[in-house]
Image (cartoon, coloured by chain):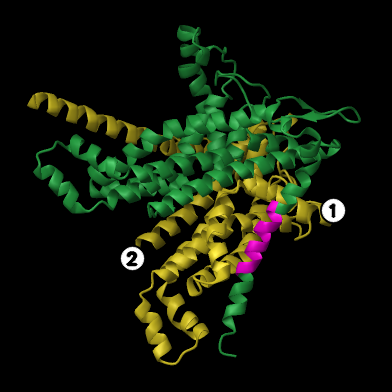
Chain colours: A green, B yellow
Amino acid sequence: MRDWLRPVLASAALLILLVLGAMILFLTYKSVPVLSREGLSFILDSGWIASEGGEEYYGIAAALLGTLYTSAIAVALALPVSVSLSVFVVEMAPRKIRTVLEGAILMMALLPTVLYGLWGLTYLGPFLLRYVMCPLHGSLGWFPLFSEEPKTGNTILTAGVLLAIMITPYMTAIIKDAYSSIPREYREGLYALGTTRAEAILVLLRMVKSSIAVAVVLGLGRAAGETVAVSMVVGNTMGISISPFRPGYTISSLIANQFGNAFLYRLMPSALYGSALILMGISTAIAVLGLWLARRWSIKWRI
Amino acid sequence: MADMRRLKNAVFLSVITSLALVGILPIAHITGAVLYNGTKALIHAGPSFLWRAPGDPSTGEIGGIGPAISGTIALLLISMLIGFPLSFLAGVYLHEFPQSAISRILMPATNLLLEIPTVVTSMFVYLVLVVPMGRFSALAGGVALSLVMLPYVTTHVREALDAVPVDFKEAGYALGLDRAKVLFLVMLRAARRGLITALLMAVAKSVGETAPLLFTIGGSGEIGYLGLGRPTSSVQLLIYRFAASPFPARQEAAWGASLILFLLFIGVFALLRKAQRGP
């Protein structure tokens, strides 16, 4: 009995694989009723009709678009911030401030998500309503993006901004690791050529653009899957609009809100398992893409 | 010409600085808001906030979050007892046998598990534990949380062991020790800082996540931990539910609870930072 350890370790590893497999199988199995009945219109239609005994119909297009919309806003806002934060921490901050900032970034990454939600509900939503949505609608209301009259702080925009705050530390971690591992000689070479600091930074940033791409992809995946904070600020209302100034739904907040009472209805549980399957499909596809890119360009980082 | 370049440089650097400031501002404001509102709620409710049950919201009485605190502590212990050993063993496996067939699947699988939305995990546990048992339970919540911490711990354990110089292992084998002895007597000790990080990461995840508890523990505030197979409440879920309540007393309780959760989190976080940065 020389190597009794291997089977013990292997069984733990196998158990994890088993759970992951079971997860995918169960979700697929449970979504069969709604998918076989509605087919593609499950994701292309936006009606959400729940009725006890009567005819039920579930389409998640509105929630799906909400997920894509909020995630897109989040990444668009988080990208310039994470790039700047990375550059600032590595290039410009004095040693002491650098340590403090790195601590703050890690704290942001790990902070309980429900605290983000509570803060977003109390401060961020009202702030955006008063200082962003109302002024923009008032002065540029003819523009489709600002056409919706803002009535509440809980909107697609608020969810997008909150998500941007939440994914910034993840994206920063990836970009910062790449940026700080650029060999010293490059920087010295650039300064020797007589570049200004800004010119040097722009060249160095171009060297880590693959890491920035990976950060965008993985940030998108994080944003799409976030549940608790988003469902506290997104407004939880079905509907499709090009303007982000109205309440909406995301797939994850749809599940969080409806799953509790879904079992009063015949088909709704299946519709929600179907939504979860779609959500998992999206996250998985994004993660696989991100990890594939990271591997191809051999990018490494730590959470 | 030179002035133009100098101007561009100044503008660019100030844009970078202000965007970096914008990125860090929210966490400062969140911290301030939690400390301020939480302290106010705690002073209003008195020290019994820590052990009483939530009050009747229509009377304006805040009451306390005692049951939720006991639930959160129980859920933390359950999830650590289930999740940590399992992911620790899996992490060791990935380190010891990186070329095996299981590892080749498990490596990408842990990355996948990391990206699975935690609300989906909650639905899965509902299906495999809550439905067969016939009710919500602390066990289901603990299992859901341990599934969430799994990929983090596995990755950290593997990386901690991989970071130990290979000479250590070779020296162990040269002394005639077997794999288990080398692992327990040499490797774990050499990698202990990384392993502590993994442990604290698991704790941070366990207190940080709310979505896994949505469809697993059932309780919303009144009942505390009563046993593995019984429903329980938790501080995280209480904040989530109370924050949306129309009653001011409930919202105040949510802020008070957020301070408790924040202090718990900061304690774990401080240890984590210390472990990461070394002595």
| Count of marks overlaid on the render | 2
Q: Residue B134 carries which label?
A: 1
Residue A111 lies within the magenta run: no
Q: Main secondary structure of the magenta part?
A: helix
Q: Which amino acid does label 1 sit on?
A: Gly
> What span is colored magenta in the figure?
A13-24
- Residue at image position (52%, 83%) is B180
Q: Which secondary structure lies at badge 2?
A: loop
Q: Which mark is residue A91?
A: none
Residue placed furthest toward the right: A53
| Residue that numbered label 2 is attached to | B279
Mark found first going from the N terminus, 1 or 2: 1
Q: Quadrant of residue A242?
A: top right
Q: Position of residue A136 (x, y in %)?
A: 46, 13
Tell me: B134 left or right of B49.
right
Q: Which amino acid does label 2 sit on?
A: Pro
Tell me: A112 left or right of A14.
left
Q: Where is residue A219 in the image (x, y as percent from the top left)?
A: 47, 41
- Residue at image position (50%, 7%) is A142
